[in-house]
Amino acid sequence: MTAKKDLSLEAIFNELAANGITLNISPKKVKNINFRLKLNTLFVTYPKGIADDYLLAMLTKRLDWAVSQHEQLLKQTAQKAAFLPKADDKNAKNTLLLWGTPQQIDLNGRAVTEFYRDELSAIVPSLLAKWQPKTAVASEVRFKTMTTRWGSCNTRARRIWLSTYLPAYPIQCSEYVLVHELCHLIHPNHSRDFWQAVATAMPDYKHWHNLLAGKSV
């Protein structure tokens, strides 16, 4: 198999743009080249003084990955939009997914995200009581309207954020995301040890992970 020829920076910009992705690249005080893909944008930071040829080689190597992963992000975003009413829709009754089941919900003047936030807030204490003894202890759990990820954490502050859209899915999905983030307080990466910690705490985590990723299960 012939190795893929390294592209010019202009060619990389154009290839990403053709797939709806903007390249945001900047030198930072970092040791390695870091890639972070969000909806419509690929963020790349690299060490100052790095050789141009090496940087272009790494960008070329990551190009196919960025395009394929971005397709998954678009798919996940479209799936959410398909079943969720507009976030500012405060009218009477709406058919919403609540814990994986379509229900007629009276929002009582609340936005959909406010309703989901209240539902999630009500169950989190019991979920923490269930899963923290099996993983790690968080300082607090907050909620955010996230559309490209289901959870995140600040390992220094031991603070966890959960997406307000989680109550649309079976409750086990919220449990999986919480377990995932709690395990990051032990392993702040996606190493083999991290995934082993997740599997030890929640052996069937892949089922719920795949459901949130839009994969067939």
Image (tube, rainbow, N blue to C red):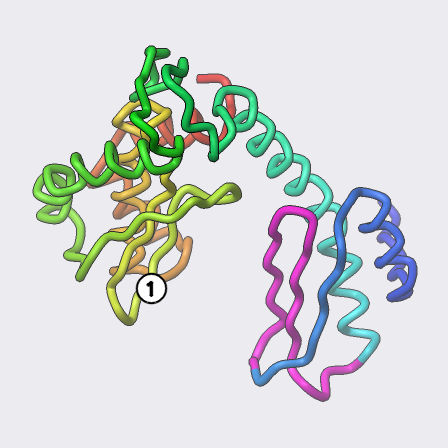
Residue at figure coordinates x 14%, y 44% from the top left = 128
- The image shows residue 14, relative to residue 203, as above or below, that is below
The one nearer the camera, 88 or 194, is: 88
Tell me residue 181's x, y (percent).
31, 50
Tell me residue 203's x, y (percent).
25, 32
* Magenta span contains residue 39: yes
Q: Quadrant of residue 208?
A: top left
Report the amino acid beneath label 1.
Answer: Asn
Q: Which residue lies under the disc numbered 1?
A: 154
Tell me residue 77's x, y (percent).
57, 33
Residue at figure coordinates x 31%, y 18% from the top left = 106
Label 1 crowd (10 A; few <14 / some 14-19 / many >=20): some
- The image shows residue 181, relative to residue 214, as above or below, that is below
- The image shows residue 199, relative to residue 144, as above or below, that is above
* On-image quarter of the N terminus: top right
Residue at figure coordinates x 25%, y 43% from the top left = 179
* On-image quarter of the C terminus: top left
Q: Residue 56 vs residue 130: left or right?
A: right
Which residues are drawn in magenta?
A: 30-51
Q: Quadrant of residue 22?
A: bottom right
The one nearer the camera, 4 or 60, is: 60
The one nearer the camera, 145 or 134, is: 145
Tell me residue 95's x, y (percent).
40, 13
**At numbered mark 1, what does the secondary structure look like: helix, strand or loop?**
strand
Residue at figure coordinates x 38%, y 53% from the top left = 152
* Magenta span contains residue 52: no
Q: How many marks?
A: 1
